[in-house]
Image (cartoon, helix red, strand yellow):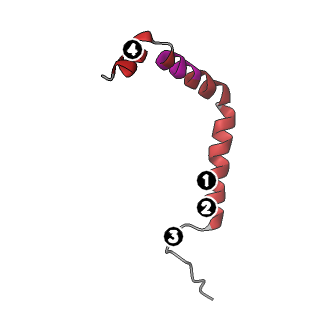
Amino acid sequence: MRKIYNQRGMGTVEIVIIIAVLVAVALLFREAITTFVSDVIDSVFNDQEIIDQLTNGR
């Protein structure tokens, strides 16, 4: 007997698997991600030149 497959789009199972993989990767690299984000935020908000440019309207 032939099975008929729906090929119009992704199903719920595929979406759940993709989300689970993304969460697993985020948990594995949690420390590296938080360090990177902290460094970027510090470099942007603690750089006086950038703050001066934003406040002077450049």
Q: Position of residue 48 (x, y in %)?
A: 44, 10
Mark 3 vs mark 4: in front: 4
Left or right of 41 in this view: 54: left
Residue labelled with disc 4:
52
Residue labelled with disc 2:
14
| Magenta part, dominant SS | helix
Q: Are marks 3 and 4 in contact (CB under 8 Å)?
A: no
Question: Magenta segment range?
Answer: 38-44
- The disc placed on residue 34 is none
Q: CA distance from mark 2 to mark 3?
A: 10 Å
Q: Position of residue 5 (x, y in %)?
A: 56, 78
Q: CA distance from mark 3 to mark 4?
A: 49 Å
Residue labelled with disc 3:
9
Q: If you read the primary sequence from the N terminus, does the residue marked by circle 2 or circle 3 appear first?
A: 3
Question: In the image, is residue 1 above or below residue 38?
Answer: below
Q: Are marks 1 and 2 in contact (CB under 8 Å)?
A: yes
Q: Tell me what residue is drawn at x 57 percent, y 83 percent.
A: 4
Q: Position of residue 40 (x, y in %)?
A: 51, 21
**Quadrant the C terminus occupies:** top left
